[in-house]
Amino acid sequence: MKNGIKYWLFTGILLLLQIAAAAQVQRSGPPKKEDQVKVDYADVFENIQQGNQVLQKLRGNVELRQDSVFMYCDSATIANSVNVVAQGNVVIQQGDTTSIFADSLIYSGETRKAVLFGRVVLLNGTQKLFTDRLDYDLNTKVATYYTGATLTNDQTQLSSRRGYYYVREHTVFFRDSVVVIDPEFNLRSDTLKFNTQTKTVFFLGPTLIRTDSSRIYCEDGFYDTENSLAEFRQEAQYARGAEQQATADVIRYDGKNQIYTLDGNARFTDTDQEAIANTIRYEERADKYYLVGNASYRDATRNIISEEIRYDRRNEQYATKGRSRIIDPPQILEADEVAYTEATGLGNALGNVIWQDTSANLTVLCEVADYNRQTNYLKAVGGQRGRPVLITEVDQDSLFMSADTLLALQVVDTLSNDTSRMLFGFYRVRIYKSNLQAVCDSLTYSTADSIFHLFKDPVIWSDTSQFVADTVDIMLRNDQIDRIFLKANAFMINSPDQLFFNQVKGRDITAFFEDSELRRVDVQGNAESIYYALDESNAYIGVNKIVCSEMLMYFGNNTVERIRFYAQPQANLIPMKKANHDELKLPGFKWQIDRRPKDRDDLSPEEAIQETEEDMPLESTPIPKKDEKPTLGRN
């Protein structure tokens, strides 16, 4: 009550001072006609002459007019028909849409500016501005306040300590302690602009927006409250709850469709997830993310890097476009495109695929890969030369394997619960390692026992030796070749010079290696051997032809050093000059050097295999003299 009395005392004193000042104005002549305020009506009219000054005192239902501006009040004093001081239920009406209500008014007809006091309300269409003092320029239709005001626009309420209302432009500038209250959000800012026609808020300084579930900070941008469209710039930040946070050069919001777009240096984090890209688009209803440009997505289990990432969080599906890298320990996948569904664990990778299993030290290169993350299954087809390639390390050296189709899957031992990986190569398998090469129709490999199983027409080459059988097994130990098992119709050929061929044939053959070099060959069942004997100077001295039940051969420097025979061996030494080398070839002899992969790039399928024997005619083959050493690698 005391504050109210003080306010009205202050206002009354101010009005008296204004009246006195108006009465003391000395004019050189009568006021201009266009500056005069006309009296249309008053219950009581009093005209007072004070020297050259004329005061008009009006009481009761006062109606005043200046051109198209109308003023109403309970009482008024007019000095020289120009300066007006009005009190009680003051109303200024300008045009059809703008009205101002106040307790008191000071108005200059010359400048057409008004100062309104008390409970001031500016009404423009559906917008209402409330304050206790308002300066209003009727020429420019600009209202200014300095003591705080509140603008209501339908369900939106805006307030600040200072502000400028451009009525003609439907624009209000709010400054100092700006607060916006809307059913959908609350806002605090230093400075903002509001278009009362489009109902759009423009942020012109540090601004914080709060909704029921989120917070947004920026220092520039706009919010179209009518259409729920917003754009936040300069230090733009978004937070939802305590977990979700986002930053970008520009954050855009489509409230009707519930779509957030982060543009430029975009980053989004949520508990154990993080998304980074040039642009991030989030569709809240569908719970989907779209990451474009230098995109990366990380959660508790994987890290995805690509040019574009599409992530359906609700259905736990993602797809990438552009060169992509998915790190999902112990597996790493690279491809031009990847699609994956968590519910099924199934994924598909396309284009220059590189799949790695770091736990098993395996790499697969292909064009298309289907995989199951839950079971660690992989199917690879296609590649740079039309076929997939598997790379692993053996003997501290890379082993390359190619086939029409490669399969990899995880196997769990039901007794020990240990896991191992199985590899399968189907059709036209080719293997290359610097000291081991092989071809076959199909192949399996298990990390549990480190054994390669080669099926259907398998051939293995190791240095100067060739191994063939119906099936062939290669056993690794400590990532080194330990043994080769030739099962059924086993045939081994060794030729240091490719002129003469040591041959071993039997039902089964086991070749033993040390430091990846052939050291011993154990022949079981129907053993036959053709062995070219050398003297101390490595000159050929004759051919040993041996038939027995079993035999054991020892090698050094890829040549036969000695042989043990078991169960009544039949041996025959033939001098070199009397030997018919063609007749010495055992049944099934086939030197298949043309099938041997030459390097890691020679893993394409064989187009045509010569079925004829590949040894050179002996008639044209010079026999080394006794003091000559065989030449290695001659064709």
Image (cartoon, rainbow, N blue to C red):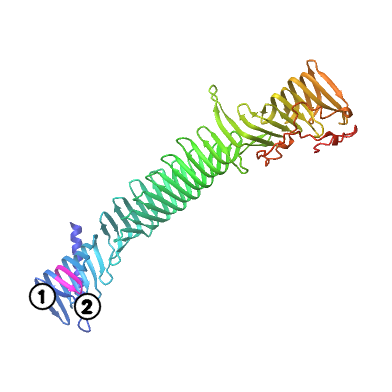
Horizontal relation, residue 503 to residue 418: left or right: right
Q: Is residue 592 visible?
A: yes
| Callout 1 secondary element | strand
Q: Amino acid at mark 1?
A: Glu
Rendering coords of residue 429 (x, y %): 64, 35
- Residue bearing the label numbered 2: 35
Q: Residue furthest bottom?
A: 28
- Residue bearing the label numbered 1: 46
Rendering coords of residue 317 (x, y %): 45, 40
311 drawn magenta = no
Residue 58 versus residue 632 in the image, above or below? below
Rendering coords of residue 462 (x, y %): 73, 32
| N-term mark: 1 or 2 | 2
64 drawn magenta = yes
Report which quarter residue 158 is drawn in: bottom left
Q: Residues within 10 Å of mark 1 (few under 14, many from 20)?
A: few
Magenta segment, which residues?
63-75
Quadrant containing the C terminus is: top right
Rendering coords of residue 129 (x, y %): 25, 61
State the predominant SS element of the stretch in magenta: strand
Q: Amino acid at mark 2?
A: Asp
